[in-house]
Amino acid sequence: MNAATNSELPVGIFDSGVGGLTVLHAIREAMPGEHLVYLGDTARLPYGTKSPLSIERYATQAAAKLRERGIKLLVVACNTASAVALDALREQLAPMPVVGVVEPGAAAAVQGRTGGSHLVLATEATVRLGAYRSAILSLDPDAEVTEHACELLVALAEEGWVDGAIARGIVRRYLDESHAASPDTIILGCTHFPLLADTIREVAGDQVRIVDSAGTTAAVVRATMDAAGTRRASDDPGTLRLLATDGARRFARVGGRFLGQDLRHEDVELVDL
Amino acid sequence: MNAATNSELPVGIFDSGVGGLTVLHAIREAMPGEHLVYLGDTARLPYGTKSPLSIERYATQAAAKLRERGIKLLVVACNTASAVALDALREQLAPMPVVGVVEPGAAAAVQGRTGGSHLVLATEATVRLGAYRSAILSLDPDAEVTEHACELLVALAEEGWVDGAIARGIVRRYLDESHAASPDTIILGCTHFPLLADTIREVAGDQVRIVDSAGTTAAVVRATMDAAGTRRASDDPGTLRLLATDGARRFARVGGRFLGQDLRHEDVELVDL
């Protein structure tokens, strides 16, 4: 494939469901000219409570589907799949570049400083694998890292109950249970959690820096394509295709909250993995 | 297969995850001599937000696996699968009897009275299909039925946060949003919800009757086997086998809450569907 053809291909973005649309949104803001194709594996979500073996199998199936459609780069816009399956996906798709969200999130948290204290809020699977801990400590061996599983925040974001007393109560309880006394940063280690960022800031206080991977991941995607010479040349707005493995209506209804725009179920194409 | 062999076979119980263990518990209490085999499709839970097509496919795969192991009756201990796939499962397994949880739950709510007002708390898929509404109205055409989707209660039960201010706040909000002014009964239309029964009673008030399917389903299972002459003759305690499609550790940890006894992950056998 020559570079001219390649640059016209879409960037593939994969998540277990709709949460990764927060990453898609950041990529579209940063590079409005790029074509994008998003695959949400809604038939098998959530990944966060599944075993590593299953998560890796699901992720490689999704990646194969996107490669079959033709993409020039894969973004794994799911913290759990990034934590579990990034190496397997890179091996599967080589030489196509694969960008996860954990490393960009860790880089955004550390930001060149040393000795920071970080609280990572994530799913059970991401916490069990210690993916953020490893990524942060590889950037700053003096950092202090606490990881805490917050499954209810996923359901809360999907239900759209992102502010008010219930959301504050749940966030408060998770922060208390994490036993992380006044961290410098709170890392939103699940793509569902940016919807709860205001509530988390309200509960944690203004002195805490809230970090999510979306913006940093978009920057890494741009740098990777610049280096490979695969950025799309045209300034026309890029196209957006949405694929899901189940439930187009629910994808449109819940996904609209994550993308920050109304979606119709006709906009979502169902695919089998 | 002759009746003598048949009666020694286990009762098969199927759910999308661990919630059906509340039904298994009621069956074991009612018929301690029966052998039981439970299959939780933890690799693909939750069913409640999936499409009917996917739910039916998953349920028939699970039923095939249990039939392969040898069972004498199948209990669909999942409201969503009962609502979506009962007819397909009966066709698939005939002449083996298949008992769902929706009809027994509706019968427990109506209890021979007429004109009652019922609030059904369930998953999105169960509500969308109106399964409880149909089942209740077929028993009492004068009944008033409100169905309300309560996805967060599933996550709440799995997290074990079944009492306290957060649980009460979430239940209060769902009851308010249901717009069901003082129903006579609240039907727990998801096998996760019995864990929240005390909190629901606390919020709804003592005058409301809280109904779940577990006990009535066990009674239907007993009556069905009595009629077919397939009850186990021996008084020895029956054996219990637990199968799951993913995450034995999580199944044991969360499942213990539903079964009301400690489970070890070695007690859970992983199977592929």
Image: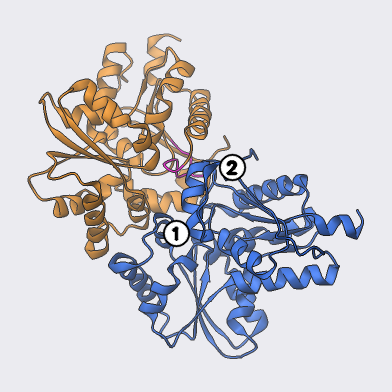
Chain colours: A blue, B orange
Q: Nearer the viewer, residue B38 or A46?
A: A46
Cα distance between the residues tagged 2 and 1: 19 Å
Is B95 above or below relative to A245? Answer: above
Q: Is residue B147 above or below residue A98?
A: above
Structural crowding at the residue carrying mark 2, measured as other residues with C-alpha within 10 Å and reported as few (<14), some (14–19) or many (≥20)? many
In magenta stretch: residue B210: no
Q: Which residue is mark 1?
A: A154
Q: Is residue B73 left or right of residue A187?
A: left
Circle 1: residue type: Val
Q: Chain of mark 1?
A: A
Q: From the top left corner, tell me how far across and down residue B13 is, in percent.
A: 39, 31
Q: Which residues are magenta?
A: B39-49
Identify the residue position indicated by label 2 in the image.
Answer: A245
Q: Is residue B40 magenta?
A: yes
How many marks overall? 2
Q: What residue appears at the point 60 percent right and 48 percent down from the top-left corner?
A: A54
A258 or A68: nearer the eye?
A258
